[in-house]
């Protein structure tokens, strides 16, 4: 799709299609009932406590040095991350998918570790290695006895950890888009005498732009919302705003400050979104060749550059995998060893696992979390498939309005979203047919679906944007109806990306605490609550050890999810990452360019109409 | 594809049905006949005191006594917010473990039902709800202490009071200071410090001198590290002292092989008293009161105290509690704190400290 150049996208023409009207009506109801109404309620309750607007919050915040500094730090981190994550992310994607690198399969697995864990445990993992008592620090101290043991702290440490922790989206979506690059354009450029570097910069990267824009927004957002890494590694000089937002959200008398801070961050996010949308409109990123061919891995011809890239790739591999190994190792140690960083081989036992798995609640919270997360992930992706397509196809003020409204969950912290749902639906409400939602199992599902909407929408839109429009046009010319085209042509093309998004949604909801604490049904409590109950700072000596065990168990679940979504097709794709076009099952078909290795088996995804 | 859709529809339907089921089950059982034995209806219990196996222990003991309880664990502030947010359509029947400051907030929001437990005569009502229409009743006492590494300091060289930490050079940057005021323990420490500087003409009822203490506390302390226990930091020599609730000390000393002693300032130490309350609007009131009568009774409180080294408020239960614990509480001087004043201002204090003094 080539930006806004397509015709027939005015608001009026949109309203002529009954299909769009139905989707629009459902969407309008959903947005009104679950995105606008609850949040308007909670904002009114915070900013107009007695019916009068109070400007107190702004006054307090702007005169607070700490608040302003933390806010500044959050923004600085967001901007820096947008750059560093792209640099590292693009590098690892090129190393695993574009250049011919020895052992790229192993490298891929190493870089993919960020799929399976994150948060406070990830930060702790890095601390085990680079912290003042960390392995690397101890080694460095032997070489340079005079150096500062606490070298790995502050902005630098936070940025490093968060950069390596958040390349997941690159590995999934940018890699996917890269596989869709038409090799013929690269060959043509080569024939014209372009160097590897020029081809990369002028041919390959521009085609990745829509996806890069989408992941840049996510990196920015991750930086703005940074919580655990600054808490563990930021030290005195680099604290971010999120902990303050959380504290104020929990204090009824200061909730207006939390809301105001959240709105400031939200406004920044929307601004970023607007800028990116504008940039996105700027150009055509698509190869127009009708018979595209599969990408072939490129040899780096300059031997010095080749060695340098190999070295960097394996260094990054070590950086990515070491924390995971240590987390698994430490999950067998006792709480004291984890917190003091002193590990003796004899102290590793299965006690932690026995304790976690034999407690009264047992495996039930795992099952509850898996069911909730899977339902929410599938509903969010399934529901937004149509919406993302429509928003991507029709660009006018109506669709822009809907798009921005769908980003509301990015603006407010999840605790406020949850409070909004409670105060809006603790009494019979006509918006939901007069039902009372609090105390039911549905309300948490609604919250889970809503918090995942913005991410799902962005990534789905990006994947629709990278679908070659010629197939759809051909089908339309031959008389296929909108739904038919969507179901038989577009859907199979974006399904791999949709599956990846669903898997990421699923993974991120598994250990949710902020939403569940307010909305979970008392008899159906998800994992996040159990983890928290066992790890609350002042609560238990074993708490930290339990967190590690839960993290490892979650790694297994999420690893399994990623395997189910990627693994089987990954095996098929193994030949392809090896080299040569033999693994490209559908190579040569226009429009199938984005499917690449994540394509599910033919039984799950019907091929585009008329394909064998 | 079709198979997948069917599966999904079935799953969604199942969830929705489960939701309805849970929603309708509650009112049906509401008219329980009033008798002394538990009816076995499921009670939803909110608490912040379910860690370290307490939740599992209580559920098991309650089952033996014929109660069916479902514990929902949440931090003190989370549980408070949840109870207040749900007041129009309460989900919990009973809440316990929160201290008097939190319950005072919940009561002020109108989410608690006044009641008198069967064991009302066995507890000192001065440490419970001191207002009209008593809505929460004391269970367990907890002292908020300043503890130090006894291997590094003797009784003579250790600090004598919190204020020594930032006024004497030998303690500067040797004590851990909090990085957030979200926890009950941190709030109680500040209640203890600020109460000493009550001044009606000062900002938020506290004199300038009082706020200066807070400023110095943050300036000279070593910030707490997320997910690293104070005892772990003491063990590794990073710091030597910091705040600790009395109930955890024995356990942590063992785990981290630290020898800790505590300071009792001349003004005394702040006592936090964990309470139990009946949630207003519960449709299982009779059963909930029976549960509270059982849980607060001398036998159960004594068993709880023995199991978890806690200090029961119930006088009869206290006789059977761990003698070391009982003796500590018998000798420790309780700081005289105007809880009404503290509760009224704590929100604003936390805000001011977070915005102006924390670094």
Image (cartoon, coloured by chain):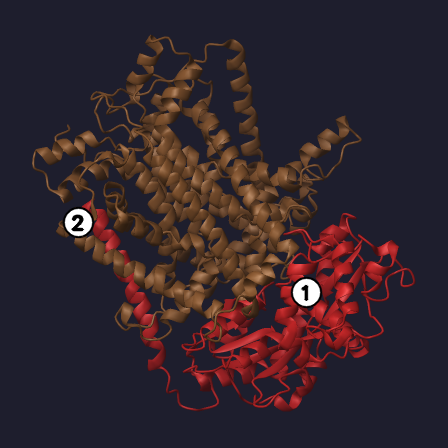
**Residue in view at x 65 percent, y 54 percent:** A65
Please rate how many residues cluster around mark 2, counting C-alpha atoms within 10 Å: few if below 14, some from 14 to 19, many from 20.
few
**Observer-nearest residue: A15 or A423?**
A15
Q: Position of residue A413 (x, y in %)?
A: 47, 57
Mark 1 lies on a secondary structure that is helix
Visible residue check, residue A200: yes
Q: Colour of chain B?
A: red
From the image, tell me which residue sits under label 2.
A12
Spatial separation of the CA atoms under disc 2 and disc 1: 59 Å
Seen in the image, is B131 located left or right of residue B234? left
Q: Is residue A437 above or below residue A96?
A: below
Chain for numbered disc 2 = A
Between B17 and A99, the residue placed more toward the observer is A99
- Is B250 situated left or right of B89 in this image? right
* Picture quadrant of residue B61: bottom right
Can you say which quadrant of the picture contains the N terminus of chain A?
top left
**Pointer 1 indicates a residue of which chain?**
B
- The residue indicated by pointer 1 is B186
Within the image, what quadrant is residue B306 found in? bottom right
Task: Report the label total.
Answer: 2
Position of residue A511 measured from the top left corner of the image (x, y, whole percent): 47, 53
Depth check: give the residue in front, A344 or B292: B292
Q: In the picture, residue A98 is in which quadrant?
A: top left
Residue A266 is marked as none
Q: Is residue B94 above or below residue A525?
A: below
Residue B21 lies, in percent from the top left, at 31, 71
Tell me what residue is drawn at x 13 percent, y 31 percent: A474
């Amino acid at each position: 799709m080539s930006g806004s150049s397509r015709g027939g996208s005015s608001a009026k023409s949109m309203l002529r299609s009954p299909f769009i009207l139905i989707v629009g009506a459902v969407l309008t109801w959903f947005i009104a009932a679950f995105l606008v109404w609850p949040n308007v309620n909670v904002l009114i309750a915070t900013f107009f406590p007695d019916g009068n607007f109070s400007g107190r919050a702004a006054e307090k915040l702007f005169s607070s040095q700490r608040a302003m500094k933390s806010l500044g730090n959050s923004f600085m981190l967001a901007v820096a991350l947008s750059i560093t994550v792209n640099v590292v992310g693009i590098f690892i994607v090129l190393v695993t998918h574009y250049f011919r690198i020895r052992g790229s399969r192993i490298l891929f697995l190493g870089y993919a570790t960020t799929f399976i864990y994150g948060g406070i445990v990830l930060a702790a993992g890095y601390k085990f290695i680079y912290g003042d008592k960390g392995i690397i620090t101890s080694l460095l101290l032997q070489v340079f006895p005079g150096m500062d043991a606490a070298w790995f702290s502050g902005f630098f440490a936070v940025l490093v950890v968060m950069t390596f922790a958040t390349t997941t989206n690159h590995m999934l979506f940018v890699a996917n888009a890269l596989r869709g690059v038409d090799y013929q354009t690269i060959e043509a450029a080569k024939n014209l005498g372009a160097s590897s570097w020029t081809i990369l910069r002028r041919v390959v990267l521009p085609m990745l732009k829509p996806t890069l824009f989408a992941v840049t927004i996510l990196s920015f957002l991750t930086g703005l919302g940074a919580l655990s890494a600054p808490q563990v590694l930021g030290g005195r000089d680099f604290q971010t705003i999120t902990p303050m937002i959380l504290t104020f959200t929990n204090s009824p008398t200061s909730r207006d400050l939390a809301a105001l801070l959240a709105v400031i961050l939200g406004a920044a996010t929307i601004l970023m979104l607007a800028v990116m949308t504008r940039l996105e409109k700027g150009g055509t990123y698509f190869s127009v060749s009708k018979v595209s061919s599969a990408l072939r891995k490129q040899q780096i011809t300059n031997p010095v550059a080749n060695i340098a890239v190999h070295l960097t790739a394996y260094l990054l591999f070590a950086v990515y995998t070491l924390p995971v190994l240590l987390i698994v190792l430490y999950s067998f140690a006792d709480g004291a060893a984890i917190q003091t960083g002193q590990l003796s081989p004899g102290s590793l036992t299965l006690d932690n696992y026995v304790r976690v798995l034999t407690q009264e609640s047992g495996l039930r919270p795992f099952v509850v979390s898996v069911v909730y997360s899977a339902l929410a992930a599938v509903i969010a992706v399934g529901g937004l498939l149509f919406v993302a397509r429509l928003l991507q196809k029709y660009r006018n003020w109506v669709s822009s309005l809907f798009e921005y409204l769908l980003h509301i969950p990015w603006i407010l912290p999840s605790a406020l979203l949850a409070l909004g749902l409670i105060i809006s639906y603790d009494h019979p409400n006509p918006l939901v047919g007069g039902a009372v939602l609090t105390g039911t199992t549905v309300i948490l599902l609604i919250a889970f679906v809503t918090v995942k909407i913005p991410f799902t929408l962005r990534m789905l839109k990006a994947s629709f944007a990278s679908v070659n429009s010629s197939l759809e046009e051909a089908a339309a010319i031959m008389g296929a109806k909108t739904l038919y085209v969507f179901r038989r042509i577009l859907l199979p093309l974006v399904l791999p990306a949709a599956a990846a998004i669903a898997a990421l949604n699923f993974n991120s909801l598994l250990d949710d605490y902020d939403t569940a604490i307010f909305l979970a049904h008392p008899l159906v409590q998800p994992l996040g609550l159990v983890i928290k109950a066992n790890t609350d700072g002042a609560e238990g000596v074993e708490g930290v050890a339990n967190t590690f065990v839960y993290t490892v168990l979650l790694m297994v679940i999420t690893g399994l999810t990623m395997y189910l979504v990627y693994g089987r097709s990954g095996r098929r794709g193994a030949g392809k990452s090896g080299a040569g076009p033999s693994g490209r099952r559908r190579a040569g078909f226009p429009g199938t360019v984005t499917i690449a290795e994540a394509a599910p088996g033919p039984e799950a995804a019907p091929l585009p109409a008329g394909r064998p | 594809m079709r198979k997948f859709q069917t599966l999904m529809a079935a799953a969604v339907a199942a969830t929705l049905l489960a939701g309805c089921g849970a929603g309708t089950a509650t009112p049906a059982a509401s008219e329980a006949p009033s008798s002394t034995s538990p009816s076995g209806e499921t009670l939803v219990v909110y608490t912040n005191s379910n860690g370290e196996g307490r939740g599992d222990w209580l559920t098991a003991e309650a089952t033996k006594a014929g109660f069916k309880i479902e514990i929902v664990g949440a931090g003190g502030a989370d549980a408070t917010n949840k109870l207040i947010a749900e007041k129009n359509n309460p989900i919990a029947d009973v809440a316990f473990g929160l201290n008097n400051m939190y319950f005072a907030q919940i009561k002020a929001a109108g989410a608690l039902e006044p009641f008198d437990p069967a064991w009302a005569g066995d507890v000192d009502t001065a440490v419970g709800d001191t207002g009209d229409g008593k809505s929460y009743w004391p269970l367990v006492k907890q002292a908020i202490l300043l503890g130090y590494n006894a291997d590094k300091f003797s009784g003579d060289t250790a600090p004598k009071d919190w204020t020594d930490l930032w006024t004497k050079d030998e303690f500067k940057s040797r004590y851990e200071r909090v990085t957030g005021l979200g926890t009950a323990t941190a709030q109680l420490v500040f209640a203890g410090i600020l109460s000493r500087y009550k001044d009606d003409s000062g900002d938020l009822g506290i004199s300038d001198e009082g706020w200066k203490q807070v400023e110095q506390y943050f300036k000279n302390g070593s910030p707490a590290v997320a997910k690293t226990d104070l005892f772990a930091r003491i063990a590794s020599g990073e710091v030597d002292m910091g705040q600790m609730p009395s109930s955890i000390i024995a356990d942590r000393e063992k785990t981290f092989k630290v020898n800790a002693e505590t300071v009792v300032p001349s003004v005394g130490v702040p006592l936090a008293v964990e309470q139990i309350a009946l949630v207003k609007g519960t449709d299982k009131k009779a059963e909930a009161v029976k549960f509270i009568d059982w849980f607060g009774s001398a036998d159960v409180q004594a068993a709880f105290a023995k199991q978890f080294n806690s200090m029961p408020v119930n006088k009869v239960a206290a006789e059977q509690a761990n003698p070391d614990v009982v003796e500590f509480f018998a000798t420790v001087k309780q700081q005289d704190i105007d809880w009404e004043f503290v509760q009224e201002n704590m929100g604003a204090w936390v805000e001011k400290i977070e915005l102006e003094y924390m670094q």
